[in-house]
Image: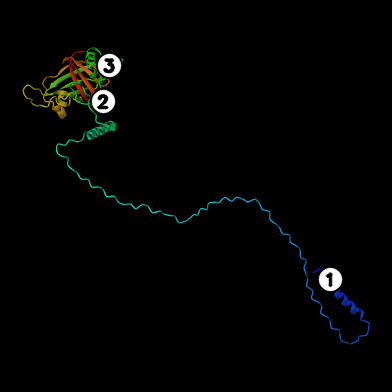
Amino acid sequence: MMRMSIRFGGIMLLGLMLVACGGNQPQTVGELPTVASLPTLTATLPISETPTVTASPSATDTITPTATVLVSNTPSVTPSATITDTPTPTVTNTPLPSNTPFPTADNEGLLALLQMAAVATVLPANLIPAAAPTVPGAVVGATVPPVVPTCSTAPSGGFAAVYNSDPSLAAQLGCPLGIVSFATAAQTYQTGQMIWMAGPPQAIYALFGSGQFTRYDDTFNAATDPSSGGETPPSGLIEPVRGFGKVWRTFAEVRAMGWATSDEAGGQSTEQIFERGQMVYLPERGMIFVLITNNGGLNGGWRAVTGSY
């Protein structure tokens, strides 16, 4: 491109010089020579050789294929097994042949279950009915294991002979606590006895023929309560009066003991108090009464032993 420009500029300069030289000469009219057509200049660009770049082989990276996880928004649900309602088998009770005993193994299994239930079932304390303690030979009720307690002191006087003669009785009474003395009165009935103890507090004990006893408060007031009910007992029997009579008329279970068979007999008694009961010597009767108390002393079991303090 540069050469073409220089060559074209030279031709133009030559033309201008020719014109300048012929400006002062007379003009001769004539035909202009035919202008030869200039060859068409074609610019030829220099060709630069482009070096061929040979790529050096680079280290081939080892490509570890990566697992492509396709996440589908549409969950694939695998149909579950078809639920088939299983019909409940019909149990047909087939009567056992007559005089056919149950297998021994079944009886043993049933007994084992019953024993497990008896040991494992624990009722709350407020649901367990209070049971009267058992006095050997007379009382029906719960039995205390006959384990003789180890006590720091021994019962006094004749009470010790009764206490030591029967380990089961000693286990029910527990250890002795003390000795007291108070006025008492006693009366026998057709099927029981009643004992009045001055206390305090004053109380009447109804000793039933079943071997059980119940304690009642002595609320008799000579100023307001009648001495008797004015009843006529059968021949040879006596109507209870005063405190005994009031309890006898008020409580049906006491009235059920029947009429009195003796008059009241009073005296000064000695009592040995135990952890779970008491022994009372009634000199008017010549006997020691053993009371195994329950439910705070309101009831329990009793027995009578001939003896003295």
Q: In which quarter of the image is the N terminus?
A: bottom right
In this picture, residue 56 sits left or right of residue 159: right
User: Residue 40's image quarter?
Assistant: bottom right
User: In the rendered image, which residue does mark 1 sit on?
Assistant: 6
Residue type pointed to by label 3: Gly
Q: Residue 268's x, y, as percent? A: 20, 15
Q: How crowded is mark 3: few (under 14 residues within 10 Å), some or many (20 or more)?
A: some
In this view, the residue in front, 146 or 178, is 146
In this view, the residue in front, 77 or 286, is 77
Q: Residue 26's x, y, as percent? A: 93, 85
In this view, the residue in front, 14 or 168, is 14
Q: Is 97 rendered above or below residue 167?
A: below
Q: Residue 24's x, y, as percent? A: 94, 82
Q: Distance between the residues labelled 1 and 2?
A: 145 Å
Q: How did the renderer colour the structure?
A: rainbow
User: For numbered disc 3, what is the local secondary structure?
Assistant: strand
Q: Which numbered tag is attached to residue 178? A: 3
Q: Is 96 rendered above or below residue 74?
A: above
Q: Which numbered tag is attached to residue 296? A: 2
